[in-house]
Image (cartoon, grey):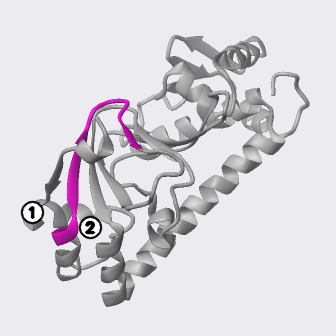
Amino acid sequence: MAEGDREIVMVKEFDLISWLQTTMVFRGLSRSQLVPVAQIAQLQSLSKGELLFKQGNEATGFFVVKSGRVKVFKESPAGKEQILNIFESGDNFAEVAALDGKPFPASASTMEPAELIFFSRAAFLNLLHQDPDIAINLLVGLSQHLRHLTGVIEELSFKDVPQRLAAYLLKLSDARVAQSADRAVPVNIVTLDLTKSQLAASLGTISATLSRALYRLSSEGLIAVNGAQIELLDRDRLQRFSQFFEPDSSR
């Protein structure tokens, strides 16, 4: 479905304001502050694999994920994909291009059926002039995105693929600890939340190299692989392995 043909529905205030207060970009704002925000919000329903925008397209606004997941990525002339970030419910993205008016610096597409809240650039810039609190929240979000991209550059520059994979598995485990209220849930077992090709693109590699990295961590007794489920056999060793540079031909 082309961007111009995508179904766009204006969202009613009473359906949206409470939810907006839970998102990073609008957290802490009062209901009265969010009334004009809700009035310019547009709900977009998308299918899996649908392209939101392509690198170089005119930036017409930014998005907040209501449901589903969206990947922002760069693609080489040869077609190799590097996933820069994955956004889930409550996350906002593409606000940099929406603010500076320049073309999108990367592409974005849905990883599964998704609902997005779209804010047009012109309408949102008008709101920023009226309410500086919204601008401050937006700056906080931009800072978090910058920190994430700095981490991506560090991983790609200074770590080989097995180390990047180790760091990713530890991150999944940490997220499971944070989300689980049940202390009986085994935190040393994680389930991959991406397909093999998506994970490879996120780690800056290809599927074949990812398979070799999984084999290396498994053969060294750091993990046990059972399909999409992975057991962290020695978390301390895995942590040390992920932090120190070891030259490897599988970069």
Of 128 and 76, the residue lying toward us: 76
Left or right of 94 on screen, residue 42: left
Please state the horizontal and vertical placement of residue 42, each as a whole percent of the image. Answer: 21, 58
Question: Pointer 1: what residue?
Answer: 12
Task: Say above or below: 239 vs 222.
Answer: below
Residue 235 shows up from this direction: no
Q: Is residue 67 magenta?
A: no
Classify mark 1: helix, strand or loop: loop
Which of marks 2 and 1 precedes in the sequence? 1
Residue type, mark 1 in image: Lys
Q: Report how far apart the C-alphas of labels 1 and 2 lie in the structure.
A: 15 Å
Q: Work out whether 92 lies above or below 190.
A: below
Q: Which mark is residue 100?
A: none
The amino acid type of the residue labelled 2 equals Gln
Label count reads 2
At a point 44% along the width and 72% down the height, the residue shown is 138
Residue found at x 42% / y 75%: 137
Farthest right residue in view: 247
* Residue 203 at x, y percent in the picture: 65, 33
Q: Is residue 102 above or below residue 251?
A: below
Residues in magenta? Answer: 38-52
- Is 170 left or right of 57, judged from the image as shown? right
Quadrant position of the N terminus in the picture: top left
> At x 14% / y 59%, what residue is drawn?
10
Residue nearer the viewer, 150 or 238: 150
Residue at image coords 46%, 46%: 178
Q: Which residue is mark 2?
A: 21
Q: Answer whether residue 39 is visible to the viewer in this image.
A: yes
